[in-house]
Image (cartoon, grey):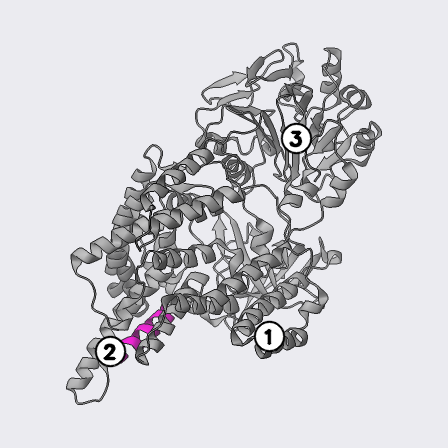
Amino acid sequence: MYRIALVAVALICMIPFWPAVPVALTSPVLLTGAVLACWVLFGPGCAIALGTVAWSVLNVGWVAADRLHPGLSGHDITIVGTICEFPRAAGNVHRFILQVARDPSGAHLPARVSLSWYDPPAGTRPAAGQRWLLKVRLKPPRGTRNPGAFDFERWVFARGIGATGYVRRSPLNRQLARGVVSCPLIAVRRHLASGVESVSEPDWPLRYLLALSVGAQHRLTADDWGLLRRTGTVHLMAISGLHIGLVAGLMLFVGRLLGRLALRAGLTCAPLNVGRVSALVGATGYAAMAGFTVPTTRALVMVAVWVLMATARRSVNPWQVLGAAGIAVLWWEPFAPYNPGFWLSFGAVSVLLLAGMAVVTPITGAAPPAVRGRAWQLMRAQFALSFGLAPLMMWLFGEISLVAPLANLVVIPVFTGLIVPLTLLGTLCQAVSPWLGKPLLAAAAWLMQAVLDGLTMLDGWPASVWRPALPGSLWMIAIALGMLVLIWPRPLLGRGFALLPLLAVLAGVADRQPPPLRLVVMDVGQGLAVLVQTPHTALLYDAGPRYRTGDAGQAVVIPVLRYFGVERLDTIVVSHGDADHAGGVRSVRAVFPNARLLATAAVLPGIRRRQTCRAGLRWRDDGVRFEVLHPQASTPGRLVDDNDHSCVLSIRLGETSILLPGDIEQAAEAMLLRHGLPGPFSIVVAPHHGSATSSSAAFVAATRPEIVIFSTGFGNRWHFPAQAVAVRWHAHAACLLNTAVTGALVFEFDTAGRLVRQTAARVVGRRLWTAGSASAALAACGAPTNYSGPRL
């Protein structure tokens, strides 16, 4: 069964690389016939694998077809639907997924839409399980695309979301009656969560208690997840095998006790079997409270198989049980392999099994090991998980926690023995009587806060996290094989010597240096953020826009910097103070507090290590020459704080020259030309995103670039770049690229300044769910004359 599950997962993981789902493969009749033929010709194993893949293909085809019609984009639509997940609130913005029941206007809409409700009326708070009539404005799902950053389009695809949008102000908006019919389970979870919220105190870590009790993670912030990830304890907030196994073990004990009492009362029963059934019931109940997520479903299936086999007095291979769980999860959630939780959940169990450790021995009735043996088993488990999951953590998150073994060695016993039992008992008792539940929840909250304080201390240790530049596929395979050798439980010849080449591989990854010059124009929507990287330094030009909740610095810039192995940011250049350029600076400075800030006098005053941006400022890093061309010391005061006062930066290496002009407009362009603009340039980021007030004919003629990049938001309301500006650049034989179409753009140069590699995130990282097509734009653009690398 495990081999069958591996084959199914491998085939399902190939589906996103298809350009589209063939129409023939969306026919249930055809796929059913193929599965039956496979059964007849090759046996049930082939049929199970092919049937699982066929079910995933059908779901992928249905979701791909269930998208908002482009003709409905941007129009007001009235819809009726149910909120079947916990909404997320940030300030006065509420975000939720609406299960669409019907559209009163008669238009065909996707079954699920993701909505944002900005500044709802006083007293209005959308909640899970409620049914609403709303006036909304929708659009097809589309997000920014950057290496190492969150893939919004994958997220909406994996959740079957066919449109995104926001709620319009309207008297029609109202809550409807009977809001729990579509998804009754969420109503029970909401009731339990409301009970916990009603007795919580201001100093309680309420968001963690809700995540542990009913799987409600909507209150956890990016900072919370960051702390858990950096300390290697993120698995504690995802209800999985650790939590399900604890509940199953407790219910096993209770069931066996009840069975023995029944025997004494003269009833005929097998106490151990009563305990096993109780364990299965308890595990199922907790999985339902958590919403039957991928980790809980995996753990529940494993518990169920073990209970059935143990009750039938049949031995079972744990790998077969894990394979059965994998098949069940793929049928329950066909898009599971597209989420990190799937790989972390199954990867952790696989590592434990490879290390020769049992995962559900209490249910089989075997005697538990002695206290000393349990301590040794816990240390072995932490060693195996820390080394075995390292390649997976590097691949998924780009970092490895070096304090994870110590953190988990202390935290896991506290969680399993105290926090989780107290939280669950308090939640259930609270549903009956607040005076029963509150003391238990208060004790869990105190312990949880103590754990968080300890994790914060560990997170503050020097070198608590290792963030190498993301290695290539061969490096990852070498690391994975080396880790496998280390955790292998059986005698293996030369195991100790395997550590030496593994350390050499890791050292090679750590020492990987960037090329002589790398330019990354990020996709931040309507704004600008550019990374300029040399072998030993990194410069950030602007940090993207500020959003209503958060900013591009946190959401895009920092993940991109981590992806390219930037551990120290030397300089942050802020072209000017507009929110679409400076909105993410404070988030970036919070992570890189020692970076020098280069900006005009009026931008972000009061920040230390600040230098005024003035023409004539020059420096060299690794042979790359940087020069500020504008503003001049004689720039008229009326231009201060205007786009025309942007800090203009020139970058040169060998035969390559790059111009980053910020948001200057034609007045500043003329001033640059009067002072002698050192053109032509190889690459120019278009001034002011391609606005009609910039890119004058004289400026275009003086720069004469081979590549012009417009950093714009998809479908932006200003319609950047302006058609006349695009025509003007094209008339001078420039290649036009737009981050709204291509995603992030990466250019790498050799020591002579020759372009050796160019990539676009929407081409290199294109998947089935990727919106739009950048290939045509890049193909029409062609390669620049000094390009010596592979074609895109």
SS state under label 1: helix
Residue positioned 63% across, 62% down in the render: 172
Task: Indicate the position of residue 78 as horizontal and vertical percent values.
Answer: 66, 62
Q: Is residue 737 left or right of residue 60?
A: right
Quarter of the rendering occupied by the C terminus:
top right
Residue 66 pos. (x, y %): 66, 63
Provide the residue span drawn in magenta: 272-286
Mark whose residue sits in front, 2 or 3: 3
Type of amino acid under label 1: Cys
Examine the rendered structure and indicate whether residue 784 appears above or below residue 653.
below
User: In terms of secondary structure, where does tag 2 sit?
Assistant: helix
454 in magenta: no
Give the residue furthest to the left.
264
Residue at 62 percent of width and 16 percent of height: 628
- Label 3 element class: strand
Foreground: 774 or 606?
A: 774
In x, y percent, where is residue 725?
A: 79, 31
- What residue is drawn where x is 33% and y is 46%? 495
Residue 677: x and y in percent read 72, 15
Residue underneath mark 3: 756
Q: Taken as a whole, is the magenta stretch helix, strand or loop?
A: helix
Closer to the chain start, of discs 2 and 3, is 2
Q: Which residue is mark 1?
A: 38
* Residues at discs 2 and 3 in contact (Cβ within 8 Å): no
Circle 2 is placed at which residue position?
272
Disc 3 + disc 1, Cβ < 8 Å: no
Q: Amino acid at mark 2?
A: Leu
